[in-house]
Image (spheres, helix red, strand yellow):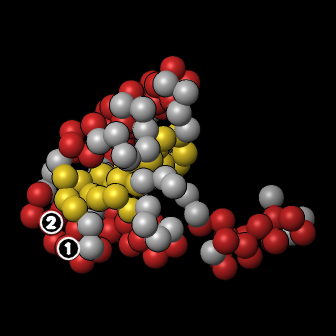
Amino acid sequence: MNKVGVIGVGSFGEKRASAVKLCAKGSLFGVADENSGRATVVANKLGVQSYSVDEILSNKEVNVIIICVPNKFHMPLTVKALSAGKHVLCEKPLSRTIREAEEMVKAAKQNKRLLKTGSNHRYFGSVRKAYEIVKSGVIG
């Protein structure tokens, strides 16, 4: 079973951690945040441990990391997690620049790990309707 760690437990991170806890019972290992107080509150709410970023990345039980931090930290944390042998789901946008994205992809390839961007809006009603309109030829 995959053991998942979530780094960054603001509103999106807490939602991702809650979803892992709900949908994949037993797979949420713990959470980490630069704000240790926030991490502790979310960890207690979810019934898991809170860790520092370095602790969760170095833990051998954790094999998947979800990164939900401000955009400027996506690249360095993703590369660090991939280099630690973790698969990574990084919130969107993946990076701020093409160069950062290339570094992330390079780290994934070098470490033979998966890298995914968190984007699940394709099934929103408004997105589906826009798709139907474009597909029908009315616009686009």
Q: Residue sitting at 21 percent across and 39 percent down?
A: 54
For label 2, count other residues whose C-alpha is less than 10 Å away and answer few (under 14), some (14-19) or many (20+): many
> In 3D space, how far apart are the residues under numbered discs 1 and 2 (Cα atoms)?
6 Å
Q: Is residue 20 above or below residue 113?
A: below
Q: Amino acid at mark 1?
A: Asn
Q: Any mark on residue 69, and which?
A: none
Q: Any mark on residue 40, and which?
A: 2
Looking at the image, can residue 132 be seen?
A: yes
Query: Residue 20 appears in which quarter of the rendering?
Result: bottom left
Q: Residue sitting at 51 percent across and 55 percent down?
A: 1
Q: Residue sitting at 48 percent across and 41 percent down?
A: 87
Q: Position of residue 18 (x, y in %)?
A: 39, 72
Residue furthest left as drawn:
37
Q: Position of residue 100 (x, y in %)?
A: 42, 29
Secondary structure of the residue carrying numbered label 2: helix
Q: Position of residue 51 (x, y in %)?
A: 19, 52
Query: Residue 120 appears in which quarter of the rendering?
Result: bottom right
Q: Is residue 73 above or below residue 27?
A: above
Q: Is residue 91 above or below residue 132?
A: above
Q: How many marks?
A: 2
Secondary structure of the residue carrying numbered label 1: helix
Do the residues under discs 1 and 2 have CB atoms within 8 angstroms?
yes
Q: Residue sitting at 51 percent across and 20 percent down?
A: 110
Is 122 displayed left or right of 112 in the figure? right
Q: Amino acid at mark 2?
A: Thr
Is 59 displayed left or right of 120 in the figure? left
For label 1, count other residues whose C-alpha is less than 10 Å away and answer few (under 14), some (14-19) or many (20+): few
Q: Any mark on residue 44, and which?
A: 1
